[in-house]
Image (tube, rainbow, N blue to C red):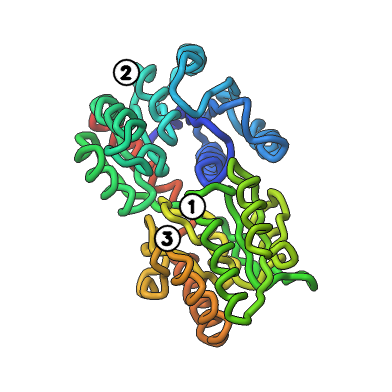
Amino acid sequence: MDRPLSILHVMRSPVGGLFRHVVDLAGEQAAHGHRVGIVADSSTGGDRADTIFAGLTPLLALGLTRVPMARELGPSDWSAGRSVAEVLARHQVDVVHGHGSKGGAFARLVGGNRVKAYTPHGGSLHYSRGTPVGFVYLTLEQVLAARTDLFLFESRYGLGAFEAKVSKPKGLVRVVHNGVSAGEFAPVPLRDDATDLLFVGELRQLKGVDLLIDALALLKARGRSLTATLVGDGPDAAAFRQRVIDRDLSASITFAGALPAREAFARGRILVAPSRAESLPYIILEAAAAGVPLVTTAVGGIAEIFGPDARALVAPGSDWALAEAIARALDERDETAALAARLRERVEAHFSVRAMTDGVLAAYADALAARA
């Protein structure tokens, strides 16, 4: 890059992997000497987002702007879009980079003649065109695709899903994997009260928490009572708590609330990630980097993380298959540990924050050159 760039990232909710991606990317871009800003929702994220933003804001030459952004389409989108436009008007922004369906929409609708980059992070791609809401969102994706200079996908799976559900992108297309930092490869000692299993993530149906609960019920019925800690919060938390009661697992499953990933890793011996859909989940990268044994499903770009060990992935949507995989991981402890070691080496070699940042900046340069 011949000169420092002015870059504005636009996202909705400051939670989960999308939030981490934006924070890591913005921080590294600022460290490279670029002028960076963020626009994000003000109504979600809670204290944790406030704390993370407080640490990042001194690095943001274009500042942090938080405005209300609803998850669904609605009248409030007009005011949120206007806020993004106002930030762009105050600065000579070179690249406006939208993340997720809502952030991507704002970036491309009000981005003007700047380079407009878009990373879906799953978002609309989790929907089916056969449903009313899916039809609306995927049609909007088609319309907005024509306003996109640069498509950035965090996995080959994400690119394939976009081509299958929306269209073949007509702008520049790059696949740049998410990455973790060097400090995340330090092992995490287990607590004395660590449970057999651990879930870390948003408590919602998409993440398969119900399948984990049911798998534990199946194993209990076979005479194998296991313990689990569920770390996170989300829209289906109350339903999952009731499901635990209904399955008579209250003594076996603990709800620990939201915690940082590495703090959570100390609470369980095997991380179970039974998602029905994903893009390229950070929690898998974080756990692999820390050497935490994994049982996870063959969805999204997870196979790209596992590489030659992708055969170890579990069929999604099946409590029976999940129960079998959990039992196997516990029974074959040497192979489970060996797999964890191989995954750690693979993530260290191929999934770093530095490589992610360099890849994104190179893509920006290509998009700017294409407009010159």
Q: Residue at x 38, y 17 (%)?
A: 110
Closer to the N terminus: mark 3 or mark 1? Answer: 3
- Residue beneath disc 1: 354
Q: CA distance from mark 3 to mark 2?
A: 44 Å
Front residue of this view, candidates 141 and 341: 141
Residue 247 image-quadrant placement: bottom right
From this view, report whether residue 323 is shown above or below residue 38.
below
The disc placed on residue 113 is 2
Closer to the N terminus: mark 3 or mark 2? Answer: 2
**Lateral position of residue 70 relative to residue 94, left or right:** right
Front residue of this view, candidates 335 and 224: 224
Circle count: 3
Percent x, y of residue 172: 25, 38
Image depth: mark 3 or mark 2 in front: 3
Mark 3 element type: loop
Mark 1 element type: helix
Examine the rendering and report whether any part of residue 190 can be seen.
yes
Percent x, y of residue 37: 54, 28
**Lateral position of residue 188 relative to residue 270, left or right:** right
- Asked if the residue at tag 1 contacts the one at tag 3, i.e. Cβ–Cβ closer than 8 Å, the answer is no
Q: Residue at x 56, y 86 (%)?
A: 331
Closer to the N terminus: mark 1 or mark 2? Answer: 2
Instruction: Name the quadrant of the N terminus.
Output: top left
Q: Residue at x 59, y 24 (%)?
A: 63
Q: Residue at x 45, y 46 (%)?
A: 357
Front residue of this view, candidates 172 and 141: 141
Examine the rendering and report whether any part of residue 86 can be seen.
no
Percent x, y of residue 233: 64, 46
